[in-house]
Image: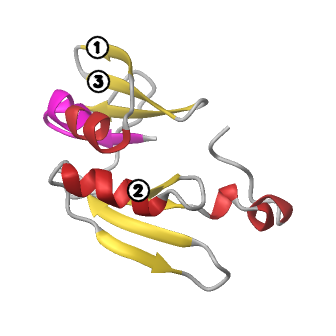
Amino acid sequence: MTLETPNPAELARFYRRAFGCGVLAEEDDRIWLAVGRTSRLGLWTPGEKEFGDQGGIRVHFAFCVTPGALDDLVARLEAEGIETREPVDHEGGDRSIYIEDPEGNVVEAWDFFQREEGRREGVGALTD
């Protein structure tokens, strides 16, 4: 996934602090961050890129977390001065928290894909 930002370095610092994302690559107009073991987050400056694509502006997306880890994540985020919406219990037993990044994107931390029923229903496991 790619987010558009006028300052990739600043937004990268946020995702590194908030979620522990590691830097995969830094280029003149973008930074790639590791998200889990097999996903990445692109932070791009505005404008068309080599394949004609552009990043998104003010989106909502979700990171998958281990069930039972949301409370620890909330504590860590709050220790970093990052406001969270307290865990929301969804129908079916999964839980989420929501934060906003410095560009106004809504970031959800969600535990459903880590639960057995998430894998059984064929929705995939995004953390692998």
Determine the residue positioned at 79% across, 58% down.
119
N-terminal-most mark, 2 or 3: 3
Q: Which residue is pictured at 54% across the width and 53% down the height?
A: 65
Q: Are marks 2 and 3 in contact (CB under 8 Å)?
A: no
Q: Which residues are magenta?
A: 2-12
Q: Which marked residue is nearer to the observer: mark 1 or mark 2?
A: 2
What distance separates the C-alpha of mark 2 from that of mark 3?
A: 30 Å
Mark 3 and mark 1: Cα distance apart in space: 5 Å
Give the amino acid at mark 3: Arg
Earlier residue among tags 1 and 2: 1
User: Which residue is tagged 2?
Assistant: 72
Count residues near mark 1 (Cα–Cα under 10 Å), then give few for <14, some for 14-19, many for 20+: few
* Circle 1: element type: strand
Question: Tag 2: residue type?
Answer: Asp
* Mark 2 element type: helix
In x, y percent, where is residue 105?
A: 28, 57
**What kind of element bears circle 3?**
strand
Residue farthest along the bottom direction in this orientation: 91
Q: Label 1 near label 3: C-beta < 8 Å?
A: yes
Within the image, what quadrant is residue 128 found in?
top right
Look at the picture and state if 126 lies above or below 10. Answer: below
Q: Which residue is mark 3?
A: 30
What is the number of the mark on residue 75? none
